[in-house]
């Protein structure tokens, strides 16, 4: 019967490293080499000097015992895969791995960048605690935006990044990297109602007429304004998703954000924007990057004579607003946008009400 004992090895800085002594040794699943020592990559202080170091030891030893129990179960089941898996010991690395599962999510990548900006490149799991999580929340609420130091990130952006951080905490807990699920203790950042940037019809026409240094960005922007597609869905769109015949074309695709399968009718005119069809598995917007959108959108707006804050996502808002203004029912718009909740779509009715009020105030009569 295989025996497993917990042992320690002195290392630098007055600490000791914990490892499992396995006897008789077990064979590496790939190389066949016999392995007796399995290091847990967890360290404690030999002589803790203060309360912080004492608390560190208490929490780490709990984790050591937990990992030992995990390995015992593996060994009893003759599952030695843990010998070939490099277990992530750093939370920042784990956060990046979670973001990489969503390669088309700009917000996930930015959430990781902000966390790295907050704590540096590395934060061992053992150093992740509730105060650190709260400090990151405060950091998001107060720190200037990366790359645009003259303005802070918006409250809603901070909320989005913190939600992704909390999701990562929960994933780390579910995967046994940490023993406490801090995500259940952390308050989210409350969203504030914002002004949704959009283009009036004449402004959208000006964009269509104006020169853009990137035809790919221009094509993507106009397509979004005519369909309401998000950038992530535009980036993933392949020619095989477009089906039908003249007068009855439609797109069948899975939304990147929600994962929902969608059926979307499109006009022949909208299809013309996309150009000559290619092989089914080829991307419709091959090579498009959000960095290019950031680079070329502002000059394109300037060429169109539009001087207001506007992002690529504003094309989606433009679609919804113009559809609502033209009389399309809010239920139809909600379905076209792929909203799960009608209340999300109802935000656009406030935009229309605001625009209507502004227009009515411009009508003035002089009379005695």
Image (cartoon, rainbow, N blue to C red):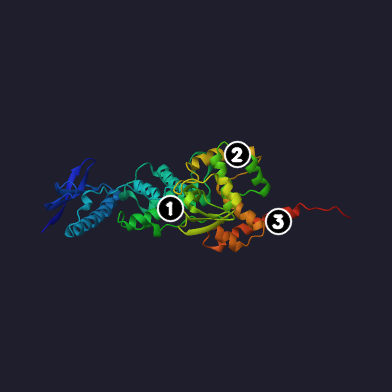
Viewer-closest of 7 and 227? 227
Q: Which residue is mark 1?
A: 164
* Rendered residue at 44%/45% (across/down): 114
Helix, strand, or loop for circle 1? helix
Vertical relation: 66 (above or below) 301: below
* Rendered residue at 71%/53% (across/down): 358
Quadrant location of the C terminus in the rendered image: bottom right
- C-alpha distance separating marks 2 and 1: 32 Å
- C-alpha distance separating marks 1 and 3: 37 Å
Nearer the observer: mark 2 or 1; the answer is: 2
Where residue 296 appears, x then y in whole percent? 55, 38
Which of marks 1 and 2 precedes in the sequence?
1
* Rendered residue at 59%/63% (across/down): 331
Helix, strand, or loop for circle 3? helix
Nearer the observer: mark 3 or 2; the answer is: 2
Whether residue 49 is visible to the viewer of this picture, yes or no, is yes
Q: Which residue is mark 3?
A: 356
- C-alpha distance separating marks 3 and 2: 28 Å
For the residue carrying disc 3, how many other residues have a C-alpha within 10 Å: few (<14), some (14-19), or many (20+)? few
Whether residue 307 is visible to the viewer of this picture, yes or no, is no
Which of marks 3 and 1 precedes in the sequence?
1
Viewer-closest of 84 and 209? 209
For the residue carrying disc 1, how many other residues have a C-alpha within 10 Å: few (<14), some (14-19), or many (20+)? some
- Whether the residues at callouts 3 and 2 have beta carbons within 8 Å, the answer is no
Quadrant location of the N terminus in the rendered image: bottom left
- Left or right placement of residue 238 versus residue 205 in this view: left
Which of marks 2 and 3 precedes in the sequence?
2
Where residue 189 appears, x then y in whole percent? 48, 55
Where residue 237 appears, x then y in whole percent? 48, 49
The label shown at residue 300 is: 2
* Rendered residue at 63%/39% (across/down): 210
């Amino acid at each position: 019967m295989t025996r497993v004992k917990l042992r320690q090895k002195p290392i630098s800085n007055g600490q000791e490293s914990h490892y499992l002594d396995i006897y008789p040794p077990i064979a590496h699943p790939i190389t066949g080499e016999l392995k007796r020592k399995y290091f847990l990559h967890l360290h404690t202080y030999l002589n803790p000097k203060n309360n912080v170091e004492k608390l560190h030891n208490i929490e780490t030893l709990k984790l050591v015992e937990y990992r030992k129990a995990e390995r015992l179960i593996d060994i009893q089941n003759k599952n030695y895969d843990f010998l070939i898996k490099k277990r992530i010991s750093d939370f920042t690395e784990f956060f990046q791995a979670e973001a990489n599962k969503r390669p088309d999510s700009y917000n996930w990548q930015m959430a990781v960048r902000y966390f790295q900006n907050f704590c540096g490149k590395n934060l061992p799991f053992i150093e992740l605690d509730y105060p650190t999580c709260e400090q990151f929340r405060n950091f998001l609420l107060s720190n200037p935006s990366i790359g645009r130091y003259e303005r802070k990130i918006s409250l809603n952006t901070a909320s989005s990044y913190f939600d992704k951080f909390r999701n990562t905490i929960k994933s780390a807990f579910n995967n046994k990297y940490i023993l406490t699920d801090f995500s259940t203790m952390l308050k989210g950042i409350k969203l504030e109602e914002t002004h949704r940037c959009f283009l009036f019809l004449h402004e959208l026409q000006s964009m269509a007429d104006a020169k853009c240094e990137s035809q790919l960005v221009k094509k993507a922007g106009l397509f979004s304004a005519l369909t309401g597609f998000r950038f992530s869905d535009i980036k993933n769109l392949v020619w095989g998703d477009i089906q039908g015949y003249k007068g009855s074309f439609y797109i069948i695709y899975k939304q990147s954000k929600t994962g929902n399968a969608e059926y979307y009718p499109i006009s022949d005119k909208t299809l013309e924007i996309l150009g000559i069809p290619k092989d089914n598995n080829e991307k419709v917007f091959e090579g498009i990057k959000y960095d290019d959108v950031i680079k070329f959108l502002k000059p394109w707006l300037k060429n169109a004579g539009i001087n207001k804050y506007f992002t690529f996502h504003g094309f989606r808002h433009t679609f919804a607003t113009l559809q609502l203004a033209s009389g399309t029912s809010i239920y139809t718009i909600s379905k076209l946008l792929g909203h799960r909740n009608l209340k999300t779509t109802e935000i656009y009715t406030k935009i229309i009400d605001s625009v209507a009020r502004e227009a009515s105030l411009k009508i003035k009569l002089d009379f005695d």
